Amino acid sequence: MRNNVPDGDPSTLVPPSGVEKRAGGPTGRVLIEQLRASIRALEQVPVSLATPPAPGAAPSRPACSLTPSHPSNDNRDSPLKALLRGGLHEIQPHAYRDTPAGLGFILSVIGEALTNCRGLVLWCLTRAASREWGRPYGPGLLRAGLDPARFLIVETDTPEECAWALEEGLKSGALAGCLAQVEIKTPLAARRLGLAAQAARTPCLLLSPHGTAAVPGTLTRWRIATEASAHVPFDTGAPGTACWRLSLERCRGGAPGARFHVEAGDEADGLRVAAASSDRAAETGDRRQHSAG
């Protein structure tokens, strides 16, 4: 049988059975060293979430972050920075079809959190959510600039089990953040999650299903919707980068009502953030004129 482990010599043949009995001999020692080298090589491969990427293939920093490409002096992105505070944050899609947009935005926030600490991210979801929207996909995370090895995936049968796993993970104090695709049905469970996240100083980002009641006790609550993608220079027919519209519905210690237009950029640009209300009237007029034309 050939040695096909990473960094191994495919031409090396594993000795046949019976060599283990002569472990003290030269051939036995060579076999043991080969097995140890194989184990060390396998330990360097990230945990498989489908097709495991090659070691070291993840970018040094996430392709999407909450750092705007052109920082402004009026600090308009400060409510978005509140998502990195330790506590429970709820993001709810404006419509059913906006759920993937909410997940993409949360992963951008998680990417920002991973640049500042070395812990893992606990990703909890129910089996119903995985059937509806799919399970986490390693190569997709890698393409988004996130290392799959930094995620600890927990899939549960019921929302109650998911809330329990989140709370226990937050109590461990070893996480960089939490991501939850679940409906928190009781105020008691939401309160326990919020207290555990604040005590651990860890952000817990909750993607609630569309149409569910607001979760009590959150630090911030956001509503997200998908917008038309931006135009690509020199190619008007090509699909542009993803654009989202965020509305702040609750902010503990701050005033709600702020709206943001968020455009996902590449690794060099990051996530571009601008106030959505600054040019809303002009944008509406442009669209009306374009429709009339």
Image: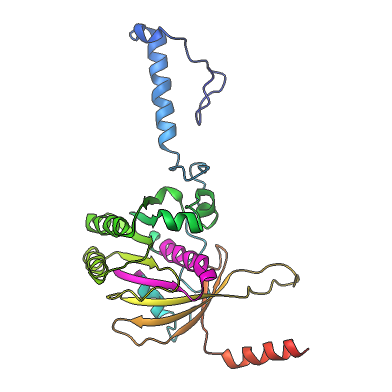
Q: Residue at x 40, y 51 (%)?
A: 150
Residue 154, compared with residue 281, is above or below; it is: above
- Residue 288 appears left or right of 72: right
- Residue 186 appears left or right of 143: left
> x, y (%) of residue 201?
26, 66
> x, y (%) of residue 59?
51, 53
Our reading of the magenta stretch's main secondary structure is helix
Residue 104 sits inside the magenta stretch: yes
Query: 138 or 164: nearer the eye?
Result: 164
Q: Quadrant of residue 36?
A: top left
Q: Let me know if residue 161 appears in the view.
A: yes
> x, y (%) of residue 165?
29, 55
Q: Residue at x 35, y 55 (%)?
A: 122
Query: 39 or 280: nearer the eye?
Result: 280
Which segment did they paint magenta? 84-112
Residue 1 sits inside the magenta stretch: no
Residue 62, compared with residue 48, is above or below; it is: below
- Residue 26 appears left or right of 72: left
- Residue 108 appears left or right of 120: right
> x, y (%) of residue 74?
44, 87
